[in-house]
Amino acid sequence: EVINVIGKGAAECWSINNLGPRIAKGNFEPGFFIKHFVKDMGIALKEAKLMNLALPGLALAYQFYMYAMALGLENLGSQGLYKVKEIHEQKKSRA
C-alpha cells in the first residue's frame, strides 16, 4: 500500500514503481548486478576526480554499494541494497 501511495505522488519514479514491489516480495534477483553498478560508479568517481568535480551523492551511494559487496550481495540486483539495511539492523539488535 505504501508503494502504491508513494508511486503515484510527487515521489513517483521507475525504481519505486518497479523495484518497490519486488523488494516487498523479497525478490532481489538482478536486473542489473550490484557488482556492475559498483564498477560503473567507480569509473564515474574516478573521471569526476580528474575533472575536479565533487559528486558527494554518488560517493555516498558508492560506499553503500561497496558495503553490500563486502556482505556478499554483489550478485543481487541494485534493489539488494535493501538487504544491507536488513543485515545492519540484525547486527544492531544482536549487539
Image (cartoon, helix red, strand yellow):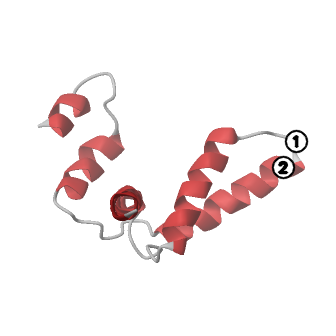
Label 2 sits on a secondary structure element that is helix
Extreme front residue here?
95
Q: Which mark is residue 52?
A: 1
Residue 2, x across and y down, in percent: 17, 35
Asked if the residue under mark 1 is in contact with the one under mark 2, i.e. CB atoms within 8 Å, the reply is: yes
Q: x, y (%) of residue 52?
A: 88, 42
48 shown above or below 32: above
**Which residue is located at x 88 percent, y 51 percent?**
50
Asked whether residue 5 is in view, the answer is: yes
User: Few, some or many C-alpha atoms within 10 Å of disc 2 (few <14, some 14-19, many ≥20)?
Assistant: few
Residue located 25% across and 23% down the image: 9
**In the image, is 12 to the left or to the right of 4?**
right
Binning the other alpha carbons within 10 Å of mark 1 as few (below 14), some (14 to 19) or many (20 upward) gives few
Q: Is residue 37 visible?
A: no
Residue under label 2, please give it: 49
Mark 2 vs mark 1, CA separation in Å: 5 Å
Q: Is residue 85 left or right of residue 2?
A: right
Please count the marks in the image.
2
- Image quadrant for the C terminus? bottom left
Image quarter of the N terminus: top left
Q: Please, what is the three-letter code of the amino acid marked with disc 2?
A: Lys
